[in-house]
Image (tube, rainbow, N blue to C red):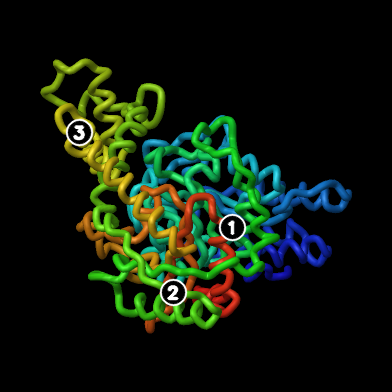
Amino acid sequence: MIDCTRSTAVSLLARLNSGEVTAESVTTAYLDRANRLDGQLHVFLHRDNERALAQARSVDAKRKAGEPLGLLAGIPIALKDVLCTIGEPTTCGSKMLENFKPPYDATVVSKLRAADAVIVGKTNMDEFAMGSSTENSAYGPTRNPWDTTRIPGGSSGGSAAAVAADFAPLALGSDTGGSIRQPAALCGIVGLKPTYGRVSRYGLIAFASSLDQIGPFTHDLADTALLMSVISGPDPRDATSVDIPVPDYLGTLDQPPKSLRIGLVREFFGEGLDPEVEASIREAIRVYEAAGATVSEVSLPHSKYGVAAYYLVAPAECSSNLARYDGTIFGHRSEDFAAKYPGEEDLPPLIRMMMASRAEGFGPEVKRRIMLGTFALSAGYADQYYTQALKVRRLIRNDFDEAFKSVDVLVGPTSPTPAFKLGERTADPLAMYLSDIYTITTNLAGIPGLSIPCGLTKSGLPIGMQLLAPAFAEENLLRTARVFEKATDWQTRRPPLA
């Protein structure tokens, strides 16, 4: 069996199209690797090897018959378990949806099937995408392939670890406040949060509807460009998707940007930034300067309010979105609710059933955010908290708009620290929330953000650099990042996974 598992999707496509390998052999190689090693990492929540191999054989038959093939014909891909897949478990990392099998596919999943991709499994995640470490999963944490005593980031930690560990060359995640970019940085891979509205959210189980966005995990930017070409575009089933042309991301990737005006965000280099992370970002800037970039310092003065604004807006939307999971129509239903609330027999049985179902179905972090959001929206407080947070959100977007008048791309660290130890921050929610201090404002502003690998710490942990661009400027964002990627080899590094 040819080992294809160190390849990129673009190189695998070339080998598939030349007949050197088959979709079945490629899929078998990735599945075998996951079978051997996932016990160390706990990347997947659900895998159906036979279904994946059947998809691969179908692609091989189409290729042999000379039938038209999709852009990802025969390429394995892993999906965050927040994306609906027809007839397959979609748990959102929660006991609340433990037995949920959607009757439909998410739009991005339909597009992947139309592109002849091979779906190899659903990946672990923080429950309902609420977390920065994938420790909030009801099914246990995922571990970082670079150091299995450490977290892979979150909430899309399973998808990031799947690509980093070479269990699949491609994966999809979702990003509400950094949940693609932060785990990409901590796992040493590429992660892109597209502009809000670039990719359909239909079939994405909602956390915060005005912030959520689906995006790719890959080893390099060519694969990112390829996957973005497949999943981007308008969708009549998602009123927030935007009907604008989708560029040929892969075709233009190696065209030098028209200008390389880079802004260093002053607020991203303050207290709490790990010295090794800062040193790697400064070195990356020198690489850009050597490539002819002009670098200037810019300010995002309202970014200091980003965490506070986010943790009012996101929990408020979470409180609303998760209200449907009460055991009546959606989600886990308690079977023993009468015994759960002794002394409260005066409450109607329906109310006691709802209380018990939500208490059993949701984990601590989800309950915390529901309570935060419900309070922020409650009578007498909404104007003080939620409405004020929306005003700050507008000011944050204004800061970005002003910055992009003088620069093309903003650059800084993705995460203030490398991957931390499992359990290190679980008792301190605020410390956990600050893991996303550099990524949250991107979601509040609705602009695209990209994390690419740019270094390793002395102890061998990956460091990520974040690049931000104006809304719907993903094409230029990828081309600007490609300048750095071509001048370095960080994207070729792999974890020493035994």
Vertical relation: 19 (above or below) 110: below
Q: Earlier in the sequence, mark 3 or mark 1?
A: 3
Residue 221, image quadrant: bottom right
Mark 2 or mark 3: whose residue is earlier in sequence? 2
Task: Point out the tag, 1 or 2, that comes first from the N-terminus.
Answer: 2
Q: Residue at x 33, y 45 (%)?
A: 394
In the rendered image, the residue lying farthest to the left is 343
Q: Residue furthest right?
A: 65
Which residue type carries mark 3?
Answer: Asp
Nearest the viewer among 356 and 260 is: 260
Looking at numbered disc 1 in the image, what kind of residue is underneath it? Glu
Kind of element beneath mark 3: loop
In the drawing, what numbered circle is on residue 221?
none
- The residue carrying mark 2 is 295
Q: Which residue is mark 3?
A: 383
Can you give x and y, in whole percent of width and height, for residue 468 in the image? 45, 60
Label 1: state its secondary structure: helix
**Which residue does the numbered mark 1 point to in the structure image?**
475
User: Is mark 1 in CB contact (under 8 Å) with mark 2?
Assistant: no
